[in-house]
Image (tube, rainbow, N blue to C red):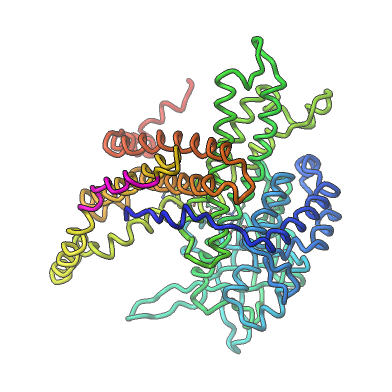
Amino acid sequence: MGKVQSHALLNFPVQDPTDKKEGEAFLVKLQKVLDQHIDAEAIDLTGEIPAAGIEALKKLGAFGIKIPKEYGGLGMSQVNYCRALEVTAAHCVSTAVLLSAHQSIGVPVPLKMFGTPEQKKKYLPRLAAGEISAFALTEPDVGSDPAKMTTTATLTPDGKHYILNGKKLWCTNGVIADILVVMAQTAAKVEKGREKKQISAFILETKGAEGFKVLHRCKFMGLNGIQNGLLEFKNVKIPRENLLGQEGKGLKLALSTLNQGRLSLPASAVGWVRKCLTWSREWGNERVQWGAPIGQHEAGSSKLASIAADLYAVDAMTTLASLWVDHKKRDIRLEAAMCKLFGSVKSHEAAELALQLRGGRGYETSASLKARGEKGIPVERVVRDSRINQIIEGTTEVMGLFISREALDRHLQIAGDVINPKAPIGKKLSGLVRSIGFYSLWYPRQWISFPVWFRFWGMGKLGCHFRYLHCTSKRLARTTFHLMALNGPGLERKQIQLMRLVWIATELFAMGAAIGRATAGKKFGENGSEAVMLADSFCQEARIRIRQHFQGIYCNSDSVKRKLGLQVLKGQQKWLESSF
Ligand SMILES: Cc1cc2nc3c(=O)[nH]c(=O)nc-3n(C[C@H](O)[C@H](O)[C@H](O)COP(=O)(O)OP(=O)(O)OC[C@H]3O[C@@H](n4cnc5c(N)ncnc54)[C@H](O)[C@@H]3O)c2cc1C
């Protein structure tokens, strides 16, 4: 809506010192276990995380990092949890996914949010001790649109059990899980004479569950160590008391779980990008071509700068959102979605840049490098492992739609009836009065930026970026309004335009977080001028990208691309597919 919450960004919160100390002590122990038991290269080659490694992680409490102490967990904060994932992912991404699928989206999260005291007492201690859990939502025919799921759970006539039937695909940890949270359709409800589909969530213990079968362990381009499967449920009996939350609230539970878990992916990403930065710096100095270290050629130094600046921004956004979770000050759904969107794209870009900088060695496997006597830097594995974050827990496109809906929501509340051609005339008129009342004050304000010119001068270079953030937020707000007025409800289908708005908003949030963190740099023990350099470089790049997105809104090839895309879909351009 054009408003920047300067206070929230510039007063970058600090982690409680006791919490930090506790977290750091845990990270030291975690690193020890990883060094001792987790060989990422062997896991990539064999596709198995060794049982001894999983046992050691269980003993350490790594499966119950966020589970409250009263239930046998470590009861750590969101920030400490994110740092644990970061450290694990820097060492082995598959192992980070094992921990994350269990406690970012697995049973502990919905159980904490929606479980009864009895369910919590029964399951949380077991989950904290390391009984592995998984989240089963996706089905072969249902991915981004889970509301259309076909797995069913039918209540038995005596009302004591549900009978589960269906299949779930790509369930991470599903192959080895002891306990699943499964979403399924329960009996439809009739509301106002119309049948309404009901989705409910269940806790399912897999051990001894008759009719439960792992049909296939899926293999992917990366993350070779994850135990991800196609699961089948054939008349599986679930006791009624294992219904999680209320009947019919299963989709809400699933989406809330994904919202809660969303910060895990960018946090893990920070881990592997730190590694990419180290490898790139070292190779940038070591490798000499054309008489100079490759990092000193401009093409090389610009890669190092991009990796470093983007890392700084993704880390700042994720830390900020995590601290907001811990301080319980705000609803961070939107920020978490932006961290996920931005972190997934930027971390994969960073891995690609590191690969390019290492040239042929970037493309060579670490085992092959070692076999011929070189350091086994696994950049190619990180490129393979990092790609998935743009697909899981909401694809980049679906995150974009989610963020844009949140952005349009306020406008739709005010002016939705006016632009809705199906709204009755009475509603249109009252909507019009409401809209005139609101927009006559709000809209002119989106053109007035000059008061901000007199602010933030004490912040040096970053002050200039912060003023830009204020002015551009207003520009974004009025552009969103213009597009709504121009397209009406049809704007929802203009996905490329919406994505431009989403990227501008996300870049602005990233800028705000980076500036906030650099301004508060000393609190984090960072060297002030270096942190300012990182934030400044990131902001300059972000501003260039933002300018391109704005230009794209009014000058683009969207309609011709749409036409061509539909032609391709129909097969009109099929001749192009053949070499003969
Ligand atoms: C390694 C891995 C681990 C996974 N772990 C789990 C897990 O633990 N639990 C679980 O339940 N699921 C899991 N999944 C499933 C994952 O969440 C889905 O793959 C994801 O939600 C996307 O669904 P889909 O693959 O069916 O793609 P689809 O939904 O078929 O989408 C295909 C493409 O179309 C785009 N698209 C879809 N709808 C729209 C739209 N309305 N507008 C514009 N574009 C659209 C998507 O962005 C995507 O690019 C996992 C998947 C993988 C590969």
Name which quarter of the figure residue 387 lies in: top right
Residue 485 located left or right of residue 16 = left
Q: Pick the residue in front: 218 or 495.
A: 495
Q: Residue at x 13, y 68 (%)?
A: 429
Q: Pick the residue in front: 493 or 232.
A: 493
Name which quarter of the figure residue 355 lies in: top right
Q: Residue 452: say if magenta.
A: yes
Residue 557 located left or right of residue 227 = left
Q: Residue at x 54, y 49 (%)?
A: 520
Image location (x, y in percent) of residue 32 = 83, 51
Q: Pick the residue in front: 553 or 140.
A: 553
Residue 88 visible in the picture: yes
Image location (x, y in percent) of residue 448 = 24, 48
Residue 259, placed above or below residue 126: above
Q: Residue 286: say if magenta.
A: no
Residue 334, placed above or below residue 39: below
The tally of labels here is 0
Image location (x, y in percent) of residue 359 = 65, 22
Residue 559 located left or right of residue 167 = left
Which residues fall within the magenta stretch? 444-456
Which quadrant of the figure contains the N terminus?
bottom left
Residue 402 located left or right of residue 103 = left
